[in-house]
Image (tube, rainbow, N blue to C red):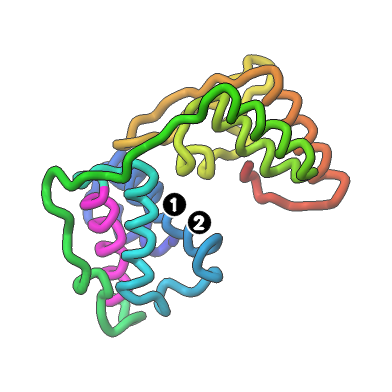
Amino acid sequence: MQRYKIDMSMRNLSPRTQQHYIYDLEQWFIYIYDKQQNRSVKELTDDDITEFIYFCMNEGNNSERIKLRLATISAFYRFMRKKKLIRENPTEFIDRPKKGLKIITQTYLTAEQVAMMREKLISSNDLQLRVYAMISLSTMARVTAIASIKWDQIDLETKIIKGVLEKEGKIVDLYFSDEVKYLLIQLKLQRKSKGIDDHGWL
């Protein structure tokens, strides 16, 4: 990744553009880690990348956002091809979405469903899952935004998560509840007691 950052700088891309590229790549890497057995990007096929794009559509990305994500991934593969790390760019086999492509219909939880979910999360005894779920409900941020949060962005005193990269590259501050503050403290203590190194990631 460091070599790619240097390459972007040499191409005189603006710091903001570089930040957007790195954000999209990090979200893609997280998906590969979680859903595609943490395989090397050199092993991925166009079908694997299409699977990620479909996931993004389910998250509410419109056609313009999908085009930007594909452009980011394609640029990364062009860099690897230039460095002779791969033979072909798999994104060349993926059709770009047409303007106005419909996204998956979004649904919202009722108060009763939220209460039921809270009970299930408590009984699951999975603190990290509970933190992710409740911070999502408290801030109303998207899954990709929550997944990109680092501990140094979180101010427990003011209950603010600063500088979160959201949809369309917007940088926002997220405000969370007392319940989330308590859960975040518990998660920190749990990881410390178990000697878990999260490398600064929530």
Q: Give the x, y percent position of residue 125.
A: 80, 43
Answer above or below: position of 136 versus 156. Answer: below
x 55%, y 70%: residue: 37
Q: Main secondary structure of the magenta part?
A: helix
Hey, what amino acid is under mark 2?
Answer: Ile
Which x, y percent locates residue 21? 33, 50
Please tell me whether residue 192 belongs to the stretch shown in magenta: no
* Residue found at the far left of this picture: 99
Quarter that holds the N terminus: bottom left
* Three-letter residue code for mark 1: Gln
Residue extending farthest top: 158
Residue 182 lies, with reference to residue 70, above or below; the image says above
The residue where tag 1 is placed is 27
- Residue depicted at x 75% and y 25%: 182
Lateral position of residue 2 relative to residue 11, left or right: right
Do the CB atoms of the residues marked 2 and 1 lie less than 8 Å apart? yes
Quarter occupied by residue 52 = bottom left
- Image x and y of residue 181, in percent: 70, 24
Residue indicated by mark 2: 30
Q: Residue at coordinates 36% horizontally, 50% vertically from top-left? A: 56
Extreme residue in the bottom direction: 87
Q: Name the one closer to the observer, 104 or 161.
A: 104
Extent of the magenta region: 66-81
Quarter of the picture containing the C terminus is top right
Q: Quarter-wise, where is residue 187 in the image?
A: top right
Residue toward you, 190 or 55: 55
Residue at (56%, 28%) from the top-left corner?
137
Secondary element under disc 2, as helix, strand or loop, is helix
Left or right: residue 20 compared with residue 195: left
Question: Which mark, by number, is residue 53?
Answer: none
